[in-house]
Image (cartoon, coloured by chain):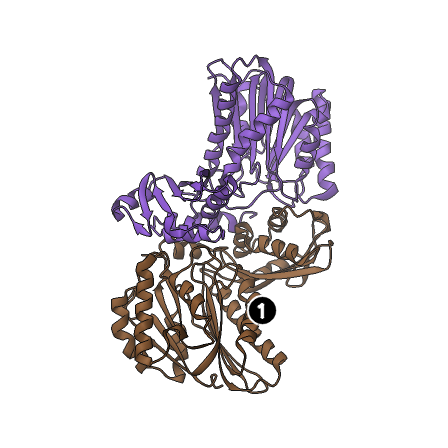
Chain colours: A brown, B purple
Amino acid sequence: MNIPEGFLFSAISCGIRRKDRLDLGFILCQDKATSAGVFTKNTVKAVPVIIGKRHIKERFARAIIVNSGVANACTGSEGFLGAEKILAELSNLLRIKKEEILPASTGVIGEPLPVEKIIPKLPDLIQGLSPENYTDFARAIMTTDTFPKVVLKQTKNDIVILGIAKGAGMIAPNMATMLGFVLTDGRIEKEDLQKLLNKAVDESFNKITVDGDMSTNDTVYALASNRKEIKDWKEFETYFTEVCRELARMIVRDGEGASKVIKVIVKGAKTKREAEILARAVAESPLVKTAFYGADLNWGRIYSALGKTQIPFDPEEIEIYLNNIPWVRNFKVEAEEEVLRKEMAKEDVEILIKLKRGKQSSWIMTCDLTEEYIKINASYRS
Amino acid sequence: MNIPEGFLFSAISCGIRRKDRLDLGFILCQDKATSAGVFTKNTVKAVPVIIGKRHIKERFARAIIVNSGVANACTGSEGFLGAEKILAELSNLLRIKKEEILPASTGVIGEPLPVEKIIPKLPDLIQGLSPENYTDFARAIMTTDTFPKVVLKQTKNDIVILGIAKGAGMIAPNMATMLGFVLTDGRIEKEDLQKLLNKAVDESFNKITVDGDMSTNDTVYALASNRKEIKDWKEFETYFTEVCRELARMIVRDGEGASKVIKVIVKGAKTKREAEILARAVAESPLVKTAFYGADLNWGRIYSALGKTQIPFDPEEIEIYLNNIPWVRNFKVEAEEEVLRKEMAKEDVEILIKLKRGKQSSWIMTCDLTEEYIKINASYRS
């Protein structure tokens, strides 16, 4: 499959934190691209988020630059000067407006961006631009990710959508939650692209949680090179959202130390918000997550997690299904322990929780909590 | 030191979940005791919580019965019948009102209370009553606890207060959070005891969090045998609260898999509620907790955890202190890495976060998150 027309990619190694690994990625759109962005709601915003929020207001964008290794968050005015210097240099080299370059960073908070390592390498970065290098770009933005996250789709009307993301921890359903880049060659107005991105993010990246933490750097950018007319908007919307969904699923699958993906669905809630709160309480309970890791059929922890929301449901009315097999009803286990244990041991587990309070439903995706998560995070900086 | 006058204790092994371990504890007050109780706010309430909330309305109480092994939660009408049967039998044997016996349970949710194992042992339980057996009682109520939790204090006016608790996981600052029993020989009116208990719980058990989960069984009972006049109420209040505080600290110290106790203090917030939310966000962040476990000086995670509350503070204004040593100010590390690392490696760590938004402060106590927590919780039932 071809990638969307009009985009070039490049990735190089600057030794930002470690030697000999790709840590600077670049996307250039050959045309003036329509742009949209969604950013973290964390009060502590990284420098690239603050700059990105300003630059996204421009009618068009031409490029995206992303570094891994350091987040450029909590770096104060020094962090700003550094980022601006890099953008100015790129603007100079490419003869494009500085405001048409969108920045993103990911990595350790509080460490300065090593501008002196990055600036001299920018000519190499530009030199390396090619339509093929998108997988290198995907690799350059990784931190604790164990695999690059790329999704490529083509609608029946030949519009191509390419999604690239990074994220493995500090993932919470409270806006963007990671770095994501969605590129298409369809022709779209800025307002429509922003609306579409908001909606797609809500149905994908905002529906995943790894550890309930929300990053200072979460950003999703969408660019459209406007090469092709979108004849079927509905179809395009579906594909666009699906690209985001698949990336979101990859992030959960790659959740730090995760051994399985758990989808928690709540049905029969009074309001959508109530369904969301209940699903999230289960998905974020460390006791539920560790039980799933151990394939321990400890359903009481699900009830307890639901109950800590203090939503006044009747516990006896609840029904729980595991991969569509009736699990608990009226506080009684409904299936053979062996059958349930086999389901629980699978890599993809779906818990459906049915209430009898109303007709609203919601879902959220998470992963289990393992010793490996602790190992990864106990010494992330070292 | 003597224990409070008027109380007898007993503990036996019924084989509720495992053989040959104490799993049923009993406290008898020789007089009509003034009683007070605080219970979980979880929507899913265990049978003993529902019964306890009813029985605590009686003017007096005479006894407390506690089992470990099963929680008697999510057990429906069968669970009620079982608990009532045990209470009726005890009432019969002791010739005290059933409603003057306060029940509590702790253990696995959803498994039935093995009434047939407990009833025949009740005569032994009563036979064993003595003032000395309070440590056996403390042992009988343990689940994943690694040590019994007992605090004994005597005021200068000779009022004795004995506190016994259990709890190591599923601990969150959202009411009681574990099982706790505070006994005194002071003379107190019911309303005063309830007020005192509420206040003490707020300043102790409600200030700790291990994993953010809230149990279905959390209960704190206070009994006063009314043997001695309390001459100095202020002094008594201080001691009573201190007993609860020390028990709370023990619970955090015994947090599942914990290697250290972390106290998070927030000062300079606009409101008390704001200070609480900020302190809790830091204390419950898995990324902060694992960093502390690894003695990783990753202060960015503290900023990120504060920021996810979306409280609009200015990140640059924040100051962080580690065991009273200035750690971060204006995004800059203020002390030698070696000095900080040594503090971080201690068993007791205090993080003070100073904002410049107002004059309100709050604190919360938690523990670090280790591989051991995962091991304990991945196969709790087995």
Q: Residue A170 in the image: x percent, y percent?
A: 45, 58
Q: Tell me which residue sits at (69%, 36%) in the image.
A: B50
Q: Is residue B354 above or below residue A345?
A: above
| Image x and y of residue B279, in percent | 46, 44
Amino acid found under the numbered disc labelled 1: Lys
Q: Quadrant of the C terminus of chain A?
A: bottom left
* Mark 1 residue element: helix
| Residue at the spot of label 1 | A199
The chain letter under disc 1 is A
B16 left or right of B98 in image? left
Q: Can residue A176 be seen in this view?
A: yes
Q: Nearer the viewer, residue B380 or B167?
A: B167
| Rendered image quadrant of residue A16 | bottom left
Say which residue appears at 60% left-offset and 76% top-offset.
Answer: A238
Q: Nearer the viewer, residue A54 or B180?
A: A54
**What x and y, as percent, mark residue A25?**
36, 74
Question: Residue A65 or B194: which is nearer the viewer?
Answer: A65
Residue B15 picture location, percent across and down: 60, 36
Q: Can I make out residue A263 in this image?
A: no
Left or right: A139 in relation to B223:
left
Quarter where residue A9 is shown: bottom left
A313 up-or-down from B244: above or below: below
> Residue placed at 28% from the left, 79% from the top?
A124
- Residue at (35%, 61%) from the top-left corner? A72
Q: In this view, does B297 lie to the left or right of B256?
A: left
